[in-house]
Amino acid sequence: MRILLAIAFCFTLVSLGSTQQSLQPLTSFKPSYSPAIGQTSSYRLLVNGEIQGESGGVVGFAHFAATVEIEQRWQKFGDKLRCELKLKGGTLRVFSSVGEQIQKLGWVQLNFVTTNTGEIVDLIGGGSRSFDELVANFDLMATALASLVVPFPKEGLQIGDAWQGVHQMGSTITLAIVQCLEQPSNFLPKLQPIKLRLRYLLPIDALVDPSLRSQWNFTARYSAESEVVFSVAEGRTISASGTIRLEVGTKIPIPQTNQEKSEQKQSQPENGQSGEKQQSQYQEQQSSQQPTSPQMTTPSFHLKVDAKFDLIKLQ
């Protein structure tokens, strides 16, 4: 009888010890996207913010709100991973002094090649057939970098750690600063949730053709700050929220008119004239020409967008 009691007592101590150990929160993690390979996750993105545009000295303001459906799928891609992001549709509402405008958002897809720990090494596709698709591509990319593709250190991390991740898309390099804040208690422990704070700057003008960028004097920057809840067990984002800012500036080139081209051609000296006479006539002709209209300045355009977003994982 005493032997049975001793065995029962020892078993109880072992059980209590293991239970207490299982309740202890983890303090070190080794996140990667490998657990999500072959899995598809659906998200709803809610965005609202303010648009400020300036063109030719005229300033305009508008508010907007958008609801977007996003799908993410991870696959093996050689020794790397491939992250497929699809903007499956949504609705954009713009509120301004002229009233409300409603626009349906179409289907857009981006493909990132990443390491197992989420550093982007290449961007596949992303071609745009229209300006609207180009904007949608950039918006989807900005959202992904702020919430869905978080870079992690290969050696793992602990609560309180901070690190820098490097995303490379062609010749464009984006640095993301990330810090692990805590292990939130309002999610199932089996998910191994961790809360992250992320900040990045994306120079999207570097993704535009250099000749076009130079011709239009085009500059564009996305910047974001966000808090992300990531499941280490599932290898994917559970939720995210934050702010995104877009600043765009450009000067629109004015093409020469046919009259200007004709005047320039006529002002050139004819062949066959002597060098001195040729130069003298050309200078007299140039000095006699007086401007008949004020000098036209190149019109400029500046756009600033400040927005808040929430990303929710759908069941």
Image (spheres, rainbow, N blue to C red):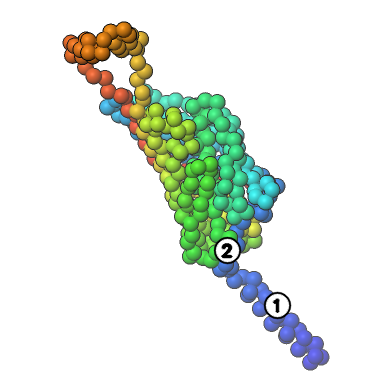
- SS state under label 1: helix
**Quarter of the view holding residue 292:** top left
Residue 269: percent from left, percent from top: 29, 10
Answer with mark 1 or mark 2, whichever residue precedes in sequence: 1
The residue lying toward the viewer, choosing from 219 and 197, is 219
Residue 239: percent from left, percent from top: 54, 50
Residue 197: percent from left, percent from top: 47, 55
Asked whether the viewer can see residue 133, the reply is yes
The residue lying toward the viewer, choosing from 94 and 141, is 141
Asked whether the viewer can see residue 181, the reply is no
Judged left or right of residue 198, residue 117 is right
In the picture of the structure, the residue carrying the numbered disc 1 is 15
Image quadrant holding the N terminus, namely bottom right
In the picture of the structure, the residue carrying the numbered disc 2 is 156
Which residue is at a point 53% across and 43% down the rendered structure image? 169
**Mark 2 burial class by Cα count in 10 Å: few <14, some 14-19, many 20+:** few
Which residue is at a point 61% across and 70% down the rendered structure image? 23
Which residue is at a point 58% across and 64% down the rendered structure image? 155
Judged left or right of residue 186, residue 198 is left
- SS state under label 2: loop
Q: Specify the amino acid type for callout 1.
A: Ser
Whether 78 is drawn above or below 255: the answer is: below
The residue lying toward the viewer, choosing from 155 and 304, is 155
Which residue is at a point 59% across and 31% down the rendered structure image? 107
Q: Specify the amino acid type for callout 2.
A: Gly
